[in-house]
Structures are given as structure tokens and as C-alpha cells.
Image (cartoon, rainbow, N blue to C red):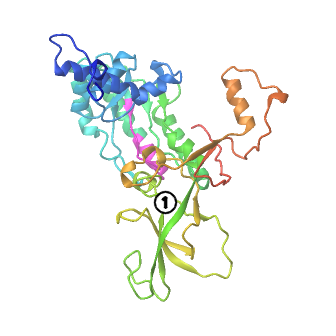
């Protein structure tokens, strides 16, 4: 009869099959959607995957073990014990903490201190866990190159501890957090020079150490231009406390609520760096005054503060604001809980870049007559949100 359950609605199990057995199978299935599975799906071999999450689920560790992924990190006893029990063939990197980090989001909560490194290495030895190197991460968007140099020096001391205990230490992971926007290009080159000098001093060429970096933020930051519309606006009269809870002076101040917020595409405010200064889609009249302005997410969330203290001309509901360099810590870390709908994403790539990708994959170049008539953007790859067509600024990439 309609409405009754049938056999297809159940998982049929054999006699003696316990709830724990069922949960184990379900966890294995859930792990099929982990990052390791996604990386493997595009053809990356298991021996090239570095599972660097500082706090790994046991189910994910078992998934890595069953699929030949061996390289991963630990920085405490709990993490070491999890890996020792669930992945005895793992090749581990000991994560060390930075003494200081000028990053907007330092990683001081992750990584072992030098004083605890020997104890952790000795524990790994007792449990027959292979330690092959040292890892550190200074946090997102680290702007002080000397922080990298100091961490490389600390890593060399940790290397010596491991070597003394009989480990074959040969991998150094210097993490990421490198500056990516176009206006910090010179700063990135300075950071690269400092890192190279420190490596020459503490890990000179020929020492047998392989250096690994994770410049994901650097590559993607300037690849994304985001557009958000103004949904509501609130005017604060002169003499009343403004958006920053200060006296607004002789002019009114304005609070604009946008179609997205810090729980959506402006996650960068929480996880990376302050919101980039917005550009106006509609060109203002030159004689119009500017006002102290604040940007907020959709109404209803008082803590959704995107930016304060902006000098902007008076805008209207429905106007668009454009934010460049929004490729890192934006949509990928957003949550639907904030009430912000996921923005529409449009991808574009120049014909030259596409042909380069095809050649890299071993495919022959497309015949001239087979090409469609397309408008080639200046950048080789970019994304924009919503439907606003805004040409992006592309930062050429480099390698440390």
C-alpha cells in the first residue's frame, strides 16, 4: 500500500551485525566526499598528497591509510596516538609553532613548542611512527618576512632533534599565508628573498632536504572579483552615535546592508584580512559629498560587521559595490546559516590560457575554424559573482 515502507528503505544486515559495524560502514561512505577523494579524482597520485590538517578525524585517517596517502602532520600527543593506531605506515611531519606571528590570524594555537618537540619525537619513536620532517604555518596573510626566517631557524633545531633520535628527516614544509593581491607584489618578492636566504643558511643545497610550500592563498586571492548589492540603508543624523559608536560630527553617517555578509562571501573578515575597499559600480558625481559609511551583512545579525570608517558618496538601495581580491577565504568558507544565499559564480578564461592547459594535458591545439568567437579577457582566469561583468585584475604568479 502507498505510504508503507519497503525493503529499499532499509540497509539489510546479516545476523550479528552490530550498530558499531553499521556506523563504521557509514563513516567510510562519508569519507568518500573528503578532500583526499576530490584530489584523487583529478588524477593526483596518493604519494603526492599531503594531508596537513592539524586535527584529523579518525575516519579520515583510516581513509587515507586505505588509499595509500601517507604524508601527514601532528603537533600533540592526541594526534600522534590517533595516527599510530589508525595508520601505522604514515610518514609524519612534526608541526612546530611560531614564536610570534604578525598575521591577522596567527596560528599560535597550532604547532608544538621547541621544548616539547623532543618529547613528541620520543613518543613517536616508542610507537614506531616514522617522522620524516618538520612543518610550520605562520597563519594567513603573514606580512613580516622575518617571521619566516625565524621559523626556518627553529625548524633546523627540530631537525637536529629528530636526527639525534635516528629519524631520516628530509622534508621541510614552510606552510603558506603569502601575500597575494597586486598591491603586495613587492612584499611577496621580499618574503621570497628572505625565505631563500634562510634556506641557504639552515638547509643549504645538497643537504638532502626537500622544501614544500602551500601558496594556495597567493594563487587565488586576486582571481576573484565580487559584486554585492545594497539591500537597505540607515542614516544616522549628525550629533548621534555613528556606526562605530562615536560622535559622527557635523555630517550624517550611513550604514549600508549588503546582500552578503561575514557568514557568506565576506568570510575573509573573520578568517583572513580586513574587507578590501569597495569600488562603486555607478560613477558618482564629482561634486557630491562623501559620508562616513559602514557596511553590514543582511539585516537581523548585529555582529555581521563587514567594514567601518569608509568615506563614500551617498548610495541608494539597489546600487552595486565591487570588491577586488576576494579569492581567498570567501565562498569556500561560507555558511548558509547566516541567511546569505550562495552567489552565482561565472568562470572565464582566455583562449591562450585554455590552449596552454590543453597542451599541458597532451591534447592537440584546436583548429582555427573550430574556435567560437569569444571575447578574451585580459586575465588568464577569473571569477565574478552575480551577473555584474567586471574585468578583474590578475596577479602574475611566481615560485619561491
Q: Residue furthest front?
A: 1
Q: Is residue 45 left or right of residue 87?
A: right
When the figure is inspected, residue 79 is found, relative to residue 331, above or below; the finding is: above
When the figure is inspected, residue 295 is found, relative to residue 250, above or below; the finding is: above
User: Residue at position x 62%, y 52% from top?
Assistant: 387
Camera-side residue: 123 or 343?
A: 343
User: Residue at position x 46%, y 48% from top?
Assistant: 329
Q: Is residue 393 magenta?
A: no
Check disc 1: other Cα within 10 Å, few if <14, some if 14-19, many if 20+: many
Q: Is residue 208 visible?
A: no
User: Which corner quadrant holds the C terminus?
Assistant: top right
Q: Which corner quadrant of the image does residue 59 belong to? A: top left
Camera-side residue: 269 or 236?
A: 236
Q: x, y (%) of residue 328?
A: 50, 47
Q: x, y (%) of residue 370?
A: 80, 28
| Disc 1, SS | loop
- State which region is magenta: 134-151
Q: Is residue 140 magenta?
A: yes
When the figure is inspected, residue 116 is found, relative to residue 244, above or below; the finding is: above
User: Which corner quadrant holds the N terminus?
Assistant: top left
Which residue is denoted by mark 1 in the rendering? 259
Q: x, y (%) of residue 354?
A: 70, 33
Q: Is residue 87 visible?
A: yes
Amino acid at each position: 500500500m502507498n505510504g508503507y515502507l519497503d525493503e529499499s528503505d532499509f540497509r539489510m544486515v546479516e545476523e550479528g551485525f552490530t550498530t558499531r559495524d553499521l556506523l563504521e560502514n557509514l563513516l567510510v561512505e562519508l569519507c568518500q566526499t573528503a578532500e583526499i577523494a576530490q584530489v584523487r579524482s583529478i588524477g593526483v597520485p596518493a604519494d603526492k598528497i599531503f594531508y596537513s590538517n592539524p586535527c584529523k578525524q579518525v575516519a579520515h585517517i583510516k581513509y587515507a591509510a586505505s588509499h595509500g596517502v601517507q604524508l601527514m602532520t601532528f603537533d600533540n600527543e592526541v594526534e600522534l596516538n590517533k595516527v599510530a593506531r589508525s595508520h601505522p605506515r604514515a610518514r609524519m611531519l612534526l608541526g612546530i609553532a611560531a614564536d610570534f606571528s604578525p598575521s591577522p590570524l596567527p596560528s599560535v594555537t597550532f604547532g608544538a613548542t621547541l621544548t616539547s618537540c623532543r618529547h613528541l619525537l620520543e613518543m613517536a619513536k616508542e610507537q614506531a611512527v616514522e617522522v620524516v620532517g618538520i612543518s610550520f604555518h605562520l597563519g594567513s596573510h603573514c606580512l613580516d618576512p622575518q617571521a619566516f626566517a625565524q621559523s626556518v631557524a627553529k625548524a633546523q633545531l627540530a631537525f637536529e632533534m629528530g636526527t639525534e633520535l635516528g629519524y631520516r628527516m628530509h622534508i621541510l614544509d614552510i606552510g603558506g599565508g603569502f601575500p597575494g593581491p597586486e598591491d603586495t607584489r613587492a612584499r611577496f618578492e621580499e618574503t621570497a628573498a628572505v625565505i631563500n636566504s634562510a634556506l641557504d643558511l639552515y638547509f643549504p643545497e645538497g643537504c638532502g632536504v626537500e622544501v614544500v610550500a602551500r601558496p594556495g592563498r597567493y594563487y587565488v586571492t586576486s582571481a576573484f572579483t565580487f559584486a554585492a548589492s545594497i539591500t537597505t540603508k540607515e542614516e544616522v543624523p549628525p550629533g548621534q552615535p555613528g556606526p562605530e559608536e562615536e560622535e559622527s560630527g557635523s555630517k550624517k553617517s550611513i550604514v549600508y546592508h549588503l546582500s552578503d555578509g561575514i557568514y557568506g562571501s565576506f568570510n575573509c573578515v573573520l578568517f583572513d584580512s580586513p574587507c578590501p575597499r569597495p569600488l562603486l559600480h555607478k560613477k558618482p558625481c564629482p561634486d557630491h559629498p562623501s559620508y562616513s559609511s559602514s557596511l553590514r551583512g543582511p539585516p537581523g545579525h548585529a555582529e555581521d560587521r563587514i567594514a567601518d570608517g569608509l568615506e563614500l558618496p551617498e548610495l541608494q538601495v539597489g546600487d552595486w559595490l565591487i570588491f577586488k581580491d576576494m579569492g581567498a577565504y570567501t565562498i569556500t568558507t561560507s555558511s548558509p546559516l547566516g541567511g546569505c544565499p550562495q552567489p552565482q559564480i561565472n568562470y572565464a578564461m582566455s583562449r591562450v590560457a585554455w590552449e596552454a592547459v590543453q597542451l599541458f594535458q597532451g591534447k592537440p591545439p584546436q583548429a582555427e575554424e573550430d574556435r567560437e568567437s569569444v571575447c578574451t579577457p585580459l586575465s588568464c582566469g577569473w571569477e565574478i559573482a552575480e551577473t555584474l561583468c567586471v574585468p578583474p585584475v590578475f596577479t602574475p604568479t611566481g615560485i619561491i
